[in-house]
Image (cartoon, helix red, strand yellow):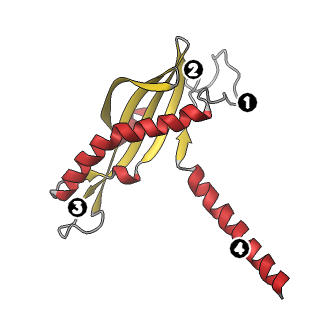
Amino acid sequence: MASKTNRTLMAMAAFMAMTLIPLSARALEVHKSLGPSGGGGGGSAQPSGGGPQRANPIPKAAQQQLMQTVSDDSDQFLNQESEKKSSGQPYMDLEHAKFSYLPDQKGGKITVQAKLTASEYKPSKSGEGKGKATGNSKALVFNYSLDGSKWTATEPPKWEDVKADTAKSK
């Protein structure tokens, strides 16, 4: 009886691990940069199709430091959005923003465009919960270069309208 209970517990633990790991894997989305042809048909000197993807040029420790740097640099924006929510104005939900980054190498330096994409909400009159989604989304965009072991901002963070960007790319 005890061995059946142990097997059941092990099966439940394995099931929980399999369901939780994909959730944490989606927390970080790395966009691979496309070749000069924009990823379209022919005309590119780069191989297309079944070739291996380019490796992420950012070492693991630098990736973790990038996430910490973005977190630190986004604090003031998080506070601003929290104040908007408290005063009943539409706000961007940066607490549940989707983090993504696009690494590149320019002049021998690693550069990154990091984004926090958030949905806009109109707070409820009672002040409880998130409020009602407006259907708008914006991305808070950070640009950094890796200087030794430190990420340095190359320009001030800025907001981008996500819907306008997706309309341009279609």
The amino acid on which the numbered mark 2 sits, given as a three-letter code, is Ser
Around disc 4, counting alpha carbons within 10 Å, would you say few (fewer than 14), some (14 to 19), or many (20 or more)? few
Q: Tell me the CA gap for discs 3 and 2.
A: 44 Å
Around disc 1, counting alpha carbons within 10 Å, would you say few (fewer than 14), some (14 to 19), or many (20 or more)? few
Q: Tell me the CA gap for discs 4 and 1.
A: 36 Å
Mark drawn on residue 12: 4
The answer to which of marks 2 and 4 sits earlier in the sequence is: 4
The answer to which of marks 4 and 1 sits earlier in the sequence is: 4
Nearer to us of marks 1 and 3 is 3
Compared across the picture, whether 31 is left or right of 75 comes to right
The answer to which of marks 1 and 3 sits earlier in the sequence is: 1
The amino acid on which the numbered mark 4 sits, given as a three-letter code, is Met
115 w.r.t. 151: above or below: below
Nearer to us of marks 4 and 1 is 4
- Image spot of residue 145 (x, y percent): 46, 22
Mark drawn on residue 37: 2
The amino acid on which the numbered mark 1 sits, given as a three-letter code, is Pro
Nearer to us of marks 2 and 4 is 4
